[in-house]
């Protein structure tokens, strides 16, 4: 664990991340000592810094610290938290912001092999995602909705659950982005008003376009997902994970374009 | 500063308040060593504990700790933070929640005397409040919207600014609740979908009803506020603070019912 480059495992109570969720984070897959999709994670972090009014962090320094922490770890999870640093009481940010960067390394989650071979089962959350154009897409520290959503089920047979906004649009899983296949087209929810724009989601969209597979980023409701030919979820740790069941409906995971799946998996394995 | 009853000024990185904003807080006015409106603050904290799935905290213990911290302080601010405690990586709450309670004492903010004598000037924020029925009313730690809203202005002549939701309803100030007077009626925004249900707001509504002043809790838009006879804002520290100017419009602070203002001020002074 590194806090501003120094080994440590505590933050002062005055940290605005604790006080108000005033900060950002990234969760990276570590493979052979390398944090995966580094550039993409840093690009999202930079967008967040801009919206929150943080000075841009030194990404070279962050990379050095990340590498020192990840060294000798074949498989691990690197979490980077960037808070607005310490401040006084009250919402008003200090005039001069000195963000606090926190790097922690965590064990690799051993997802069951069948999830990837046969597909996962998805539930549907009661907890709704709220809409906020300004914060949409960012991975900020205000994640109470995801916490409440993830606390809705304990059944280990359900790997993930869908979250809707209050206008009945499906936005995401509690910790993943969503894709559906309809004929030749790949569709994924528009995240301009809610949700987190995942780095693997971005990669999937780009690679699909490279493979000349039609992609639509649009508003989708539950019925769209239930009528789809196939579904998959994405996140930094799982990569692409096919869906076998949503509610009562079964999906044929063979309908997920193999070339797309393989290309993305290769990029993730090579930790680019 | 007390963390679970023990003097300290740091929390572990694993605290879910820091990781996800997974917690609640209360800000209390301390008068002559007593934290004001204790029962009301505890009632809101309890509602939050219920929604977040925390075990109910020991309010007697919390009171003891609060009193020990506030002793000998004529005027101060007590902040109580309750997080879900420490947990592993991932949104899923630990099966057995052991919340962390954090009590800190802060200097009393010396608001200018004219604010109360002549009324404050209100601005209007660009940052919107997002809607979430489940979390509405609670004082939880996901406060990035308020932080962004409060960072919109530096002009000390503007004491507070209004926040709207994405359906153009006025919800609150960045750190206060709002009231308007229209003829004989006192109106305040409905907070069933967004905003924080303030303890002084609650007190004002109750006292108005006791004084047989008609109160409406309803949806209000900016135009309603601009057309009002008078406006005031409330929070735990300011109590009732009259508004002199919103945008270009001036208000007559004499139109705020004096009996209501005095009754509430007396209750706050006696720190009930």
Image: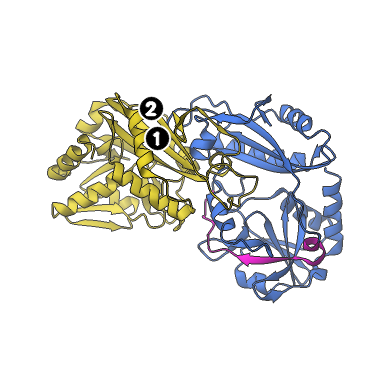
Chain colours: A blue, B yellow
Q: Residue at x 36, y 28 (%)?
A: B69
Give the left or right position of residue B7, taking residue A146 as reference.
left
Magenta region, residue range: A114-133
Name the chain letter of the residue that bears numbered label 2: B
Q: Nearer the viewer, residue B256 or A108?
A: A108
Q: Is residue B46 in view from this perspective?
A: yes
The answer to whether residue B14 is magenta is no
Give the left or right position of residue B81, taking residue B244 as reference.
right
Q: Residue at x 24, y 47 (%)?
A: B203
Q: Quadrant of residue B185?
A: bottom left
For mark 1, give the secondary structure.
strand
Residue B106, label in figure? 2
Q: Is residue B196 in view from this perspective?
A: no
Q: Position of residue B157 (x, y in %)?
A: 33, 29
Q: Which residue is labeled 1 in the image?
A: B79
Quarter of the picture holding the C terminus of chain B: top left
Name the chain letter of the residue that bears numbered label 1: B
Q: Rounded to the nearest whole Å, what is the CA distance between mark 1 and mark 2?
A: 8 Å
């Amino acid at each position: 664990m590194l806090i501003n480059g120094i080994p440590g495992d505590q933050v002062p109570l005055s940290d605005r991340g604790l006080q108000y969720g005033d900060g950002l984070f990234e969760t990276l897959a570590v493979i052979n000592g390398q944090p995966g999709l580094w550039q993409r994670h840093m690009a999202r972090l930079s967008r967040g810094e801009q919206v929150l009014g943080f000075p841009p962090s030194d990404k070279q320094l962050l990379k050095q610290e990340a590498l020192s922490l990840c060294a000798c770890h074949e498989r691990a999870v690197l979490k980077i938290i960037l808070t607005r640093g310490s401040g006084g009481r009250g919402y008003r940010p200090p005039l001069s912001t000195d963000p606090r960067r926190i790097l922690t390394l965590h064990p690799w989650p051993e997802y069951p092999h069948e999830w990837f071979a046969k597909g996962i089962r998805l539930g549907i959350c009661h907890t709704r995602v709220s809409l906020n154009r300004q914060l949409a897409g960012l991975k900020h520290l205000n994640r109470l909705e995801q916490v409440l959503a993830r606390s809705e089920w304990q059944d280990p047979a359900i790997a993930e659950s869908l979250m809707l906004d209050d206008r009945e649009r499906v936005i995401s899983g509690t910790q993943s982005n969503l894709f559906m296949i309809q004929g030749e087209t790949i569709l994924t929810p528009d995240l301009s008003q809610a949700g987190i724009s995942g780095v693997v989601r971005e990669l999937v969209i780009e690679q699909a376009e490279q493979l000349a597979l039609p992609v639509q980023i649009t508003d989708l409701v539950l019925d769209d997902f239930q009528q789809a030919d196939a579904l998959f979820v994405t996140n930094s740790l799982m990569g692409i994970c096919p869906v076998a069941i949503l509610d009562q409906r079964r999906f044929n995971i063979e309908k997920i374009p193999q070339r797309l799946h393989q290309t993305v998996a290769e990029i993730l394995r090579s930790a680019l």
